[in-house]
Amino acid sequence: MAEFDTIRTSAGARTAQIDQGLRTHMNKVYGTMSVGMIITFLAAWAVGNNATMMNTLFTGFTRYIVMFAPLIMVFAFSAMINKLSAAAAQLFFYTFAAVMGVSISYIFVVFTDFSIAQVFLITAISFAGLSLWGYTTKKDISGWGSFLIMGVIGLIVASIVNIFIGSPAIMFAISVLGVLIFAGLTAYDTQDIKNEYLAHAHHGDSEWLGKSAIMGALRLYLDFINMFIMLLSLMGGRE
């Protein structure tokens, strides 16, 4: 009986340790994501309110570089993550956040400051609720992954095509579907980040945990930014 109590106590302590580790891990994910968001919006505000920079960056072929640079960096980051140290991965993420800010700086020219703030608040509340649900739900939503990723690929292709077509109807459809897809991804990614930590918690690999937290921050950051841009396209008041 004493041996059973010892085993049970040890198992309970181990569970408590994993729970504490998970909270620390998720705090790092959300913290890193939040710093990235601040960098993005500071960069977007600085460029968006500078007419000279806007004319330089969003004229001619340069605008395509600015538009596609974040997408290229995401693919590069995913390919390089295993070769980077945790510190290098974090620096890459913050650099990416700044580039993303430049890429979306046009919002300060197209939309009113009030509507940007209003939609940002709506996005933040929605994101928090969806992420909390993804973290706490007992329902396994891992099956959503393939469907949602295919949806993202479809959005990217449709967006590229619409750059040349310029159809308001297609843009509206992209925005509506984008909100739904990135809302689903917010819940899915949160649960997946949690499950990934739990699956590797017993390894105790601090380097892996550090890079995993940064990759998780990138996933949630992209969900937030894309949902914000889609909602802004639908609800934002134009200048």
Image (cartoon, rainbow, N blue to C red):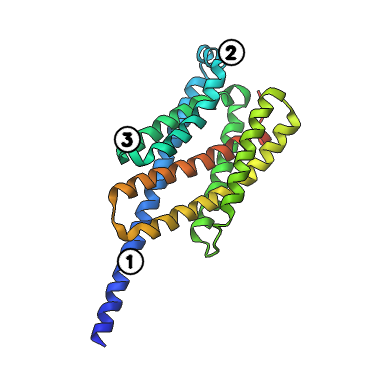
Q: Which residue is mark 3?
A: 88
For the point 33% across and 66% down, the residue is: 16
Q: Which residue is mark 1?
A: 16
Secondary structure beneath dot 3 equals helix
Q: Quadrant of residue 18?
A: bottom left
Image coords of residue 77 (percent x, y): 42, 36
Q: Which residue is mark 2?
A: 60
Q: Earlier in the sequence, mark 3 or mark 1?
A: 1
Q: CA distance from mark 1 to mark 2?
A: 57 Å
Amino acid type of the residue tagged 3 in the rendering: Ala
Do the CB atoms of the residues marked 3 and 1 lie less than 8 Å apart?
A: no
Q: CA distance from mark 2 to mark 3?
A: 33 Å
Do the CB atoms of the residues marked 1 and 2 lie less than 8 Å apart?
A: no
Asked if residue 50 lies left or right of residue 80, the reply is right
Q: Between 126 and 183, which is closer to the camera in this rendering?
A: 183
Image coords of residue 52 (percent x, y): 51, 11
Secondary structure beneath dot 2 equals loop
For the point 58% across and 50% down, the residue is: 146
Label 3 crowding class (10 Å Cα cut-off): few <14, some 14-19, many 20+?
few
Q: Earlier in the sequence, mark 2 or mark 3?
A: 2
Secondary structure beneath dot 1 equals helix
Asked if residue 239 lies left or right of residue 40, the reply is right
Label 2 crowding class (10 Å Cα cut-off): few <14, some 14-19, many 20+?
few
Q: CA distance from mark 3 to mark 1?
A: 31 Å
Question: Which of labels 1 and 2 is toward the front?
Answer: 2
Q: Check the image and report above or below for 150 versus 156.
A: below
